[in-house]
Amino acid sequence: MFNDTRENKPPGLMFGDSGVAALLSVQAALQQRHYDPFPQPEPVRVIAKIMNNLPVALRVQIADGISSSIGQPASEFREIDPDILAKWVIDGYPAEKYPGVVIGAPGLAATFLCTLMGYPFLPQSMLHNARRDIQPDDAQGYLDAGREITEPVLEKHPSLEATIHFDPVHDRFLIRRLVFVRMKMRNLPTAYRKFIADRLLPGSPVILVDCRYKWLRAEISDRLYFQLGGLGGISPQEYIEESEQLRSYRREWGATSDASWKIDHEYIEGPESEWGSVGPFLDEAEIAATESGQHPIRITHDHPSLLSERVFRLYSRSWQGHDRPTDVYVSVFTHSEPRFPLVTGCLPLWLPFITDENVRFAGKVLDEWRKLFPVEKPTGTVYVTLHPSFCSPPDIVDLSKWRELFSGYFEAIKFLGIDPGRYPFDLGSYVAMYPAILHEASQAKYPGTPFKRLPLDELEEILTT
């Protein structure tokens, strides 16, 4: 039996995180059930739909209140322990032998790989938060608050590295109430090592997801970093220089004229907070795999979306339907459900966020796909689960751009759980996505999956080239 790991989560952990979402969704998929990123009782779902009809300003206020309610007490940081985190990960998988495992960076494209092949996912990083009211442009105050609660954790646990992640553009409504700290395991924990040695079939692949995505960050103290901004269509340098575009954006959202994102440290390039791999963690996993007689495969990529491109290609090659694949499932950030493609016959394309660079990337992948499967006119259906932002940063893409992109490739466009008139201030999408997924899955035209598991040599060739 699978344990419901949400019931006994470790201290300070945040479920709305890419690493945690990847873990929980794979645990659900391997149990052959769909994953609900934001489980709520039915009355709450009804109330959320009603509140979604309120004016934008009120919806933002409600989102702000919800942000405060999901914050953890700062005191929980004292209880963070990498061994407890790793054991919690492993406890979500039943005690049986698996045909492989995926370990490392948390791009949710890995969840579609795991679901297709029947592999567990073991993340390197997880997001923690602490409830704290801070002005959304007070970078130094945010840094100081994060440092106060994080340095004692790092002093106690040398195997951890942490980044205080401050994004006043994409996370603007969240950072008013929460201090985000992403913890990464620099060393392979004992629970992961034992999983590789004891819970895999002989000769199984151990897939090491090595994301080399870089960002500018400030070193605050030993193994503690501060990152301003994050992945999207805005460069790290533009955040640091506080471009006129960004100054104008924050003024629109009520920032005072003297607002500043300056801090008392210099920035240097390093692994990005959410997506970048750090330390000897993967090297140690590779050694553990070799010593246990398993087959390590390292997937090295410079951007989290590049893994998504390879997984999309993997599903294309795994297709065994009687016709050609025509449908695609596009998911964004944590609004993603990895079992949906298997039951609907969709090719999965996961995108890190809802910004312009992700639209361009999606267009590139779809264009290359259509060259392999040319059609005279748009055909098939694209199913889309977009992540709401509750703000309107300059790099965000509205629904008209998504429609324009998809209409060039697909006859039908279905936004699952999205209210087109409310997006991106779409409060209801958090509770409407899962029922929409279940409904479409119930209409599946394939009684079983039209995808096959590829042999190890083909799998390795697709993932590493």
Image (tube, grey):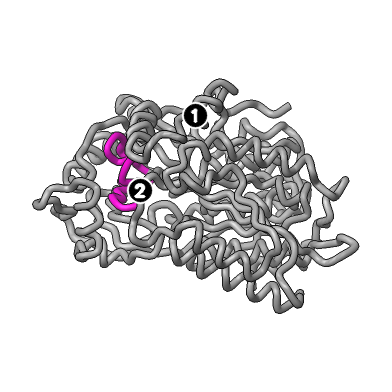
Q: Residue furthest right?
A: 322
The percent coordinates of residue 281 (x first, y second) are 49, 52
Quadrant of the image occupied by residue 38: top right
Q: Residue at x 46, y 44 (%)?
A: 422
Q: Residues within 10 Å of mark 1 (few under 14, many from 20)?
A: few
What stretch of residues is rendered in magenta?
A: 160-181
Quarter occupied by the N terminus: top right
Q: Secondary structure at mark 1?
A: helix
**Furthest residue to the left?**
258
Instruction: Identify the element where label 2 is drawn.
Output: loop
Give the left or right position of residue 1, taking residue 280 as reference: right
- Residue 404 pos. (x, y %): 55, 66
- Residue at the image position 50 percent from the left and 57 percent from the top: 399
Q: Which residue is mark 1?
A: 50
Label 1 or label 2, whichever lies nearer to me, is: 1
Percent position of residue 219, x then y: 25, 54
Residue 366 in the figure: left or right of residue 238 = right
Q: Residue at coordinates 21% horizontally, 59% vertically from top-left? A: 248
- The quarter of the rendered structure image containing the C terminus is bottom right
Front residue of 204 and 302: 302
Which numbered dot is residue 244? Answer: none
Q: Tag on residue 391?
A: 2
Is residue 165 inside the magenta stretch? Answer: yes
How many numbered tags mark residues here? 2
Percent position of residue 388, x then y: 46, 46
Vertical comparison of 159 with 178: above or below: below
- At label 1, which amino acid type do we have? Ile
Residue at 58%, 49% in the rendered image:
385
Nearer to the camera, 127 or 437: 437
| Residue 225 appears in view | no
Q: Nearer the viewer, residue 361 or 265?
A: 361
Q: What's the distance in space between the residues labelled 1 and 2, CA to CA?
A: 20 Å
